[in-house]
Image (cartoon, rainbow, N blue to C red):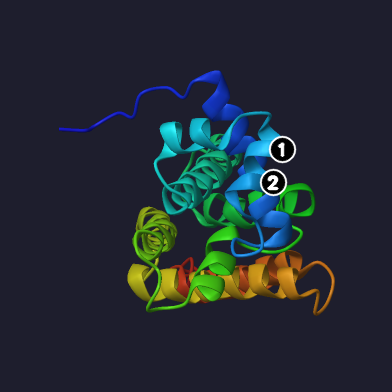
Amino acid sequence: MTVVDPPLTPAALRVLEAASRLFYERGIHAVGVDTIAEAAGVTKKTLYDRFGSKEALVVAYLKSRDDNWRAHLDTHLARVPDPGAARILAIFDAAIAWSSDNSPKGCSAINARAEIGVDNGGSLLPEVSRQKAWLLGLFADLSRGAGTNDPEGTARMLMLLYEGAIVTLGMGTFPDPFALAREMAETVLAAALPQPRTLER
């Protein structure tokens, strides 16, 4: 049975919006609950009443960003409903459209994982793992639907391209990494998809 979280109160929404902006811009450790409460226009008690702990608020922040990304991605996938390479490449198209306005510092989940570390992750690490497992599963499902000769292997290669692009974006190593990742994904898919048979004369 799926458990649906109750809708957030207006005060909780303000807290989440303020926390999301501050966590992404400054980092999780650098932002305290006092700063978040002040930015949201609520008391610290209200923050704890709504979320229970800073860790729970961080998890809510990661989930909220992931939900927004998935809604954005769904819009792009809806434009390419038929299985095939173009539907897989739509993930990279969605990332290109999303990244400049929403992810100038790279992936919030990767950043949180790097900041928190392995031993102090608590409930954060399962959330980060959940998000990455979902994306890998999506690549595998779309690769399977496209008829690639090795859906799981293709998905892993595409995931490496995607993750490499978003880390490169956050580091500012070179411009437009998702555009290059998309070109490389086209090459991967061309090799993974069955080649059309030519008629012998």
Q: Identify the mark at residue 104; answer none if there is no mark.
A: none
Q: Residue 173's quadrant in the figure?
A: bottom right
Residue topped by disc 2: 21
As displayed, is residue 60 above or below residue 128? above
Q: Is residue 20 visible?
A: no
As displayed, is residue 13 above or below residue 23? above
Q: Is residue 183 visible?
A: yes
Horizontally, residue 167 falls left or right of residue 80, namely right
Horizontally, residue 198 falls left or right of residue 182, namely left
Residue topped by disc 1: 39
Q: Residues within 10 Å of mark 2 (few under 14, many from 20)?
A: some
Percent position of residue 119, x then y = 37, 78
Q: Tell which of 33 and 195 is nearer to you.
A: 33
Asked whether disc 2 touches disc 1, contact meaning CB atoms under 8 Å apart, the reply is: yes
Percent position of residue 121, x then y = 40, 68
- The residue furthest left is 1
Q: Which residue occupies 49% across, 53% down?
A: 84
- The residue furthest right is 175
Q: Residues within 10 Å of mark 1 (few under 14, many from 20)?
A: some
Q: Earlier in the sequence, mark 2 or mark 1?
A: 2
